[in-house]
Image: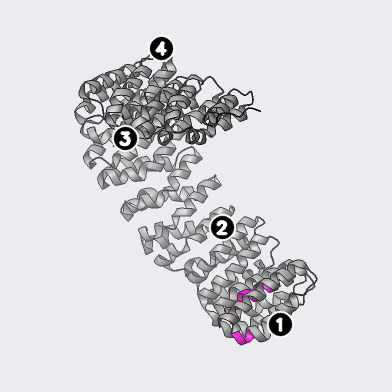
Amino acid sequence: MATIDEPLYPIAVLIDELKNEDIQLRLNSIRRLSTIARALGEERTRKELIPFLSENNDDDDEVLLAMADELGVFIPYVGGFEYANVLLPPLETLCTVEETCVRDKSVVSLCRIGTQMREQDLVDHFIPLVKRLAAGEWFTARVSSCGLFHIAYPSAPETFKTELRAIYSQLCQDDMPMVRRSAATNLGKFAATVEPVHLKTDIMSIFEDLTQDGGDMLLFSTLIKFYFSLSPLWSANITMSPFVTVSDQDSVRLLAVEGCAALGKLLEPQDCVAHILPVIVNFSQDKSWRVRYMVANQLYELCEAVGPEPTRSDLVPAYVRLLRDNEAEVRIAAGGKVTKFCRILNPELAIQHILPCVKELSTDSSQHVRSALASVIMGMAPVLGKDATIEQLLPIFLSLLKDEFPDVRLNIISKLDQVNQVIGIDLLSQSLLPAIVELAEDRHWRVRLAIIEYIPLLASQLGVGFFDDKLGALCMQWLKDKVYSIRDAAANNVKRLAEEFGPDWAMQHIVPQVLDLINNPHYLYRMTILHAVSLLAPVMGSEITCSQILPVVINASKDRVPNIKFNVAKVLQSLIPIVDQSVVEKTIRPCLVELSEDPDVDVRFFATQALQSTDQVMMSS
């Protein structure tokens, strides 16, 4: 058998695989281009591999996409940036194919290569490539060229810069909508490289031409984003009228609202009042609920931008309209901002204009509106002050605490600390308990889980006396819940309560009740108690752990269920750092030795693991 000439072998394999009918083989070959290039060396890669790829690009789109991606990082394999220009021909060809993702990837790779090319090479090779693509007969080439101007322009001589601006202007007036759309999409990147003197003349002229293309909504939406990205440069002469009047499409007006909020932060208050405020007030009454929804989300930011007086005269009425909107989605967005909005008003205005709407929302037919309101309404207490909170807000709090929808009650309970700072918790405590009990016994386990997570917060707000009388039994009840996530959260809850009220309180009110449950007939509940014990031990300290907790754990090692026994081994391992070494030697180690001889393989495994920990502790001491 004749041997293949070694230097020719990689290119021979590549050619063979690229012509194979199996697309996966062709893909694998393309993805190994870097390996093949290393085998060939830099010179042969430039002279043989790259020309071969330029000539053989009539393939499946997936293969061409992989090729475009690989070529973008190929500069090291052709000899460095000095020879980067040799990579341009195959990518130029790929920029003209029909498949969009291949063209886009080719443009990305060309941009990556262009940023690494020497300035003279850009002038000699990259700029001519851009001009060829821009003059291409097929629209795909012209589409691709739009994404390359921002790379070519900065290094171009002045005469070339004038020509490139003129070419880009022609692309923006191209007969094909896809070309105009691509030009609009890339206009921001190109404009960022253009000198300020040409920005307001050539680029804004291009922009104004494109805005007349009102039939192409995607193009117009893109233009709005571009306009707001550069608007600070001409903010003194800004006008929003084109965006309000040109399109009847709500998708475009949505972008205009978003742009108003962004622009409002950049302008002086007087400019914002003159140009942005009328548009937003108009949009707050828009026929599309999506536009009104966007206004409700953005209104608070605009209030900060325009200042207190325009907010009082123009934006408060607009906000009240949104709070009373016919669409629930708009009311949800507006209701969720009520506290933020009240913070920028004085209490009298908030009570006069906003509070009546809040009362209406608290009995809204949509549970999601009530839930959104409940998540923020507690924050109004510090804004309105003690007297107004007791007189005006407290009845709303109590109403929401009795809401039939669990999320509403949960949202109120989760923000109790904000009310406690203003009026104290006593006025709410009698209504709190029924709501907490009802949530604790809710048939949906996720609701029960949520209220468990708020128990430490409630304990800190309500105080130890209220907790002992009302909530202690609930905490024990959750340790026997049918859902594992509830039992696990309950175990963590008893630990957090012990941290909140201290070991002495825990020893009196938690530890005895928890330890009593170790005799529960259901093994899953016994496992939960072992988990709770392991969490409590570090909080309770060495003395209580040795006298109260450890005997119960040792006794559980006699359980008939293997799962209990290997969990005992885990708990004993976690107790080793807490107790004295003498306790480890006399009590924990003998128990682990016995478990390490258990018939069950899992029990033996965890017991052996725990024994290794005891040995390490003894060796280190």
- Determine which residue is flagged by label 1: 590
Compared with residue 414, is residue 518 higher up or lower down, i.e. above or below?
below
What secondary structure is the stretch in magenta mostly built from? helix
Res 111 label: none
Span colored in magenta: 568-583
Nearest to the eye among marks 2 and 3: give it: 3
Badge 2: how crowded within 10 Å, few (<14), some, or many (20+)?
Answer: some
Distance CA(mark 2)–CA(mark 4): 71 Å
- Give the spatial CA distance, label 2 vs label 3: 48 Å
In the picture of the structure, the residue carrying the numbered disc 4 is 137
Precedes in sequence: disc 3 or disc 1: 3
Alpha-carbon neighbours of circle 3 within 10 Å: few (<14), some, or many (≥20)?
Answer: some
Amino acid type, label 4: Glu
Find residue 106 and report its horizontal and vertical position in percent. 44, 27
Badge 1 amino acid: Pro
Q: Position of residue 209 (x, y in %)?
A: 30, 19
In the drawing, what numbered circle is on residue 402? 2
Farthest residue in the front direction?
A: 2
Instruction: Tell which circle, 2 or 3, labels the residue nearer the N-terminal end.
Output: 3
Provide residue 173's location: percent of width, then percent of height.
34, 16
Q: Residues within 10 Å of mark 4 (few under 14, many from 20)?
A: few
